Amino acid sequence: MVAPDELRGLMRLWPHGVSVLTVDFEGNTMGVTVSSLVSLSLDPPLVGVSIGKTASCYAILQTSGKWAVSLLGGDQAELAARFAAGRPPIVHWDGVTVHQGTIAPLIDGAVGWIEATTRAEHDAGDHTFFIGDVVNVEHGPATSALMYRESTYHRL
Ligand SMILES: Cc1cc2nc3c(=O)[nH]c(=O)nc-3n(C[C@H](O)[C@H](O)[C@H](O)COP(=O)(O)O)c2cc1C
Protein backbone atom coordinates (compact mmCIF):
# COMPACT_ATOMS: atom_id res chain seq x y z
CA MET A 1 0.00 0.00 0.00
CA VAL A 2 1.33 3.48 -0.84
CA ALA A 3 0.83 6.62 1.22
CA PRO A 4 -2.14 8.82 0.16
CA ASP A 5 0.22 11.65 -0.78
CA GLU A 6 2.06 9.42 -3.24
CA LEU A 7 -1.14 8.87 -5.22
CA ARG A 8 -2.22 12.50 -4.85
CA GLY A 9 1.25 13.69 -5.92
CA LEU A 10 1.05 11.83 -9.20
CA MET A 11 -2.63 12.35 -9.99
CA ARG A 12 -2.37 16.13 -9.54
CA LEU A 13 -0.16 16.10 -12.65
CA TRP A 14 -2.86 14.32 -14.64
CA PRO A 15 -5.48 16.70 -16.13
CA HIS A 16 -9.14 16.14 -15.34
CA GLY A 17 -12.26 17.72 -16.77
CA VAL A 18 -14.29 19.67 -14.22
CA SER A 19 -18.04 19.34 -13.63
CA VAL A 20 -20.50 20.40 -10.96
CA LEU A 21 -22.72 17.63 -9.66
CA THR A 22 -26.14 18.92 -8.62
CA VAL A 23 -28.81 17.19 -6.63
CA ASP A 24 -32.33 18.23 -5.69
CA PHE A 25 -34.25 16.45 -2.96
CA GLU A 26 -37.67 17.93 -2.27
CA GLY A 27 -36.49 21.43 -3.17
CA ASN A 28 -33.23 21.17 -1.23
CA THR A 29 -30.60 21.76 -3.92
CA MET A 30 -26.88 21.24 -3.55
CA GLY A 31 -23.90 21.32 -5.86
CA VAL A 32 -20.32 20.12 -5.61
CA THR A 33 -17.35 20.40 -7.95
CA VAL A 34 -16.17 17.02 -9.21
CA SER A 35 -13.38 15.79 -11.46
CA SER A 36 -14.26 12.11 -11.08
CA LEU A 37 -17.02 12.01 -13.70
CA VAL A 38 -16.46 9.14 -16.11
CA SER A 39 -18.41 7.71 -19.01
CA LEU A 40 -18.70 3.98 -18.26
CA SER A 41 -20.95 2.34 -20.82
CA LEU A 42 -22.91 3.23 -23.95
CA ASP A 43 -25.30 0.27 -23.96
CA PRO A 44 -26.85 0.98 -21.60
CA PRO A 45 -25.62 4.55 -21.20
CA LEU A 46 -23.91 4.74 -17.79
CA VAL A 47 -21.79 7.34 -16.05
CA GLY A 48 -19.98 7.23 -12.72
CA VAL A 49 -18.86 9.73 -10.14
CA SER A 50 -16.89 9.30 -6.92
CA ILE A 51 -18.16 11.38 -3.98
CA GLY A 52 -16.42 11.83 -0.63
CA LYS A 53 -18.38 10.43 2.30
CA THR A 54 -17.90 13.74 4.15
CA ALA A 55 -19.14 15.89 1.23
CA SER A 56 -22.08 18.07 2.26
CA CYS A 57 -24.21 16.73 -0.59
CA TYR A 58 -23.52 13.08 0.31
CA ALA A 59 -26.65 12.37 2.36
CA ILE A 60 -29.11 13.95 -0.06
CA LEU A 61 -27.36 12.35 -3.01
CA GLN A 62 -27.91 8.94 -1.44
CA THR A 63 -31.49 9.76 -0.46
CA SER A 64 -32.56 11.29 -3.75
CA GLY A 65 -31.09 8.55 -5.95
CA LYS A 66 -30.76 10.93 -8.91
CA TRP A 67 -28.33 13.66 -9.90
CA ALA A 68 -27.05 15.83 -12.70
CA VAL A 69 -23.66 17.01 -13.84
CA SER A 70 -22.92 20.29 -15.60
CA LEU A 71 -19.74 19.90 -17.67
CA LEU A 72 -18.10 23.27 -17.13
CA GLY A 73 -16.85 25.49 -19.93
CA GLY A 74 -13.35 26.93 -20.05
CA ASP A 75 -14.46 30.29 -18.64
CA GLN A 76 -16.32 28.82 -15.64
CA ALA A 77 -13.40 28.43 -13.22
CA GLU A 78 -15.06 30.80 -10.74
CA LEU A 79 -18.04 28.43 -10.53
CA ALA A 80 -15.77 25.43 -10.03
CA ALA A 81 -13.97 27.19 -7.17
CA ARG A 82 -17.26 28.29 -5.65
CA PHE A 83 -18.75 24.77 -5.55
CA ALA A 84 -15.51 23.37 -4.12
CA ALA A 85 -15.26 25.92 -1.33
CA GLY A 86 -17.29 24.08 1.30
CA ARG A 87 -19.65 27.02 1.83
CA PRO A 88 -23.33 26.74 2.81
CA PRO A 89 -25.61 25.99 -0.19
CA ILE A 90 -27.29 29.41 -0.02
CA VAL A 91 -23.91 31.03 -0.75
CA HIS A 92 -23.20 28.50 -3.51
CA TRP A 93 -26.27 29.45 -5.50
CA ASP A 94 -26.18 33.21 -5.00
CA GLY A 95 -25.94 34.76 -8.49
CA VAL A 96 -25.55 31.43 -10.31
CA THR A 97 -27.82 31.18 -13.34
CA VAL A 98 -29.36 27.77 -13.85
CA HIS A 99 -32.15 26.16 -15.79
CA GLN A 100 -34.22 23.32 -14.45
CA GLY A 101 -33.43 19.88 -15.84
CA THR A 102 -35.64 16.84 -15.47
CA ILE A 103 -33.82 15.95 -12.22
CA ALA A 104 -31.83 18.87 -10.82
CA PRO A 105 -30.71 22.42 -11.64
CA LEU A 106 -28.29 22.65 -14.56
CA ILE A 107 -25.67 25.41 -14.56
CA ASP A 108 -26.07 27.72 -17.55
CA GLY A 109 -23.25 28.22 -20.07
CA ALA A 110 -21.71 24.74 -19.73
CA VAL A 111 -20.37 22.40 -22.43
CA GLY A 112 -23.37 20.21 -21.68
CA TRP A 113 -25.40 18.40 -19.06
CA ILE A 114 -26.02 14.80 -18.07
CA GLU A 115 -28.80 13.63 -15.78
CA ALA A 116 -28.76 10.20 -14.19
CA THR A 117 -30.56 7.94 -11.74
CA THR A 118 -28.41 5.92 -9.38
CA ARG A 119 -28.13 2.27 -10.46
CA ALA A 120 -25.48 1.19 -7.95
CA GLU A 121 -23.29 2.54 -5.16
CA HIS A 122 -19.90 0.98 -4.53
CA ASP A 123 -17.80 1.57 -1.46
CA ALA A 124 -14.54 3.22 -2.51
CA GLY A 125 -12.66 3.89 0.73
CA ASP A 126 -13.32 7.44 1.87
CA HIS A 127 -15.55 7.91 -1.22
CA THR A 128 -18.57 6.12 -2.67
CA PHE A 129 -18.64 5.46 -6.40
CA PHE A 130 -22.11 6.18 -7.77
CA ILE A 131 -23.05 4.56 -11.08
CA GLY A 132 -25.97 6.21 -12.85
CA ASP A 133 -28.29 5.34 -15.72
CA VAL A 134 -28.22 8.34 -18.04
CA VAL A 135 -31.74 9.66 -18.56
CA ASN A 136 -30.96 12.95 -20.30
CA VAL A 137 -28.06 14.46 -22.26
CA GLU A 138 -27.98 18.03 -23.57
CA HIS A 139 -25.38 20.14 -25.30
CA GLY A 140 -24.62 23.65 -24.04
CA PRO A 141 -23.06 26.74 -25.59
CA ALA A 142 -19.48 26.53 -24.22
CA THR A 143 -16.87 25.94 -26.92
CA SER A 144 -14.01 25.10 -24.54
CA ALA A 145 -13.82 22.82 -21.51
CA LEU A 146 -12.52 23.50 -17.99
CA MET A 147 -9.61 21.32 -16.89
CA TYR A 148 -7.79 21.01 -13.57
CA ARG A 149 -4.10 20.21 -13.22
CA GLU A 150 -1.61 21.01 -10.44
CA SER A 151 -4.27 22.89 -8.44
CA THR A 152 -4.89 25.26 -11.35
CA TYR A 153 -7.81 25.62 -13.76
CA HIS A 154 -7.08 25.58 -17.49
CA ARG A 155 -9.17 26.14 -20.58
CA LEU A 156 -8.99 23.48 -23.28
C1 LIG B 1 -11.13 20.40 -9.30
C2 LIG B 1 -11.79 19.69 -8.14
C3 LIG B 1 -12.30 18.43 -8.32
C4 LIG B 1 -12.94 17.76 -7.27
N1 LIG B 1 -13.46 16.52 -7.49
C5 LIG B 1 -14.14 15.89 -6.50
C6 LIG B 1 -14.74 14.62 -6.74
O1 LIG B 1 -14.68 14.06 -7.84
N2 LIG B 1 -15.42 14.04 -5.72
C7 LIG B 1 -15.53 14.65 -4.49
O2 LIG B 1 -16.16 14.06 -3.60
N3 LIG B 1 -14.96 15.86 -4.24
C8 LIG B 1 -14.28 16.49 -5.21
N4 LIG B 1 -13.72 17.70 -4.98
C9 LIG B 1 -13.90 18.34 -3.64
C10 LIG B 1 -15.28 19.01 -3.52
O3 LIG B 1 -15.51 19.89 -4.61
C11 LIG B 1 -15.45 19.85 -2.24
O4 LIG B 1 -14.34 20.67 -2.09
C12 LIG B 1 -15.60 19.01 -0.98
O5 LIG B 1 -16.71 18.13 -1.12
C13 LIG B 1 -15.84 19.91 0.26
O6 LIG B 1 -16.95 20.76 0.04
P1 LIG B 1 -18.38 20.50 0.74
O7 LIG B 1 -18.16 20.64 2.22
O8 LIG B 1 -19.31 21.55 0.18
O9 LIG B 1 -18.80 19.11 0.37
C14 LIG B 1 -13.06 18.37 -6.00
C15 LIG B 1 -12.51 19.67 -5.82
C16 LIG B 1 -11.88 20.31 -6.88
C17 LIG B 1 -11.33 21.70 -6.66
Image (cartoon, grey):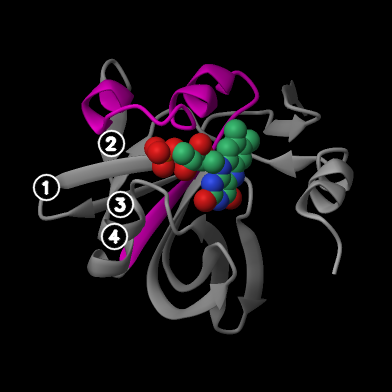
For marks 4 and 3, give the CA distance: 10 Å
Task: Classify 10 Å Cα crowding around label 4: few (below 14), some (14-19), many (20 and above).
Answer: few
Please tell me whether mark 1 or mark 2 is closer to you in this view.
Answer: 1
Q: How far is the residue under mark 2 from the one under mark 3? A: 13 Å
Q: Which residue is identified by label 2?
A: 99
The correct choice, above or below, for 1 with respect to 113 in the image is: below
Where is residue 12 shown, x and y percent of the image?
81, 39
As drawn, which residue projects farthest toward the left?
A: 26
Q: Amino acid at mark 3?
A: Val
Mark 4 or 1, closer to the camera: 4
Question: How much space separates mark 1 and mark 3, taking CA atoms?
Answer: 9 Å
Residue type at numbered disc 4? Ala
Please give the residue where the numbered disc 1 appears in the rendered image: 27
Q: Disc 2 marks which amino acid?
A: His
Using the image as rendered, state which of residue 11 and residue 42 is in the foreground.
Answer: 11
The residue indicated by pointer 4 is 59
Q: Residue at x 27, y 21 (%)?
A: 91
The region drawn magenta spans 66-93
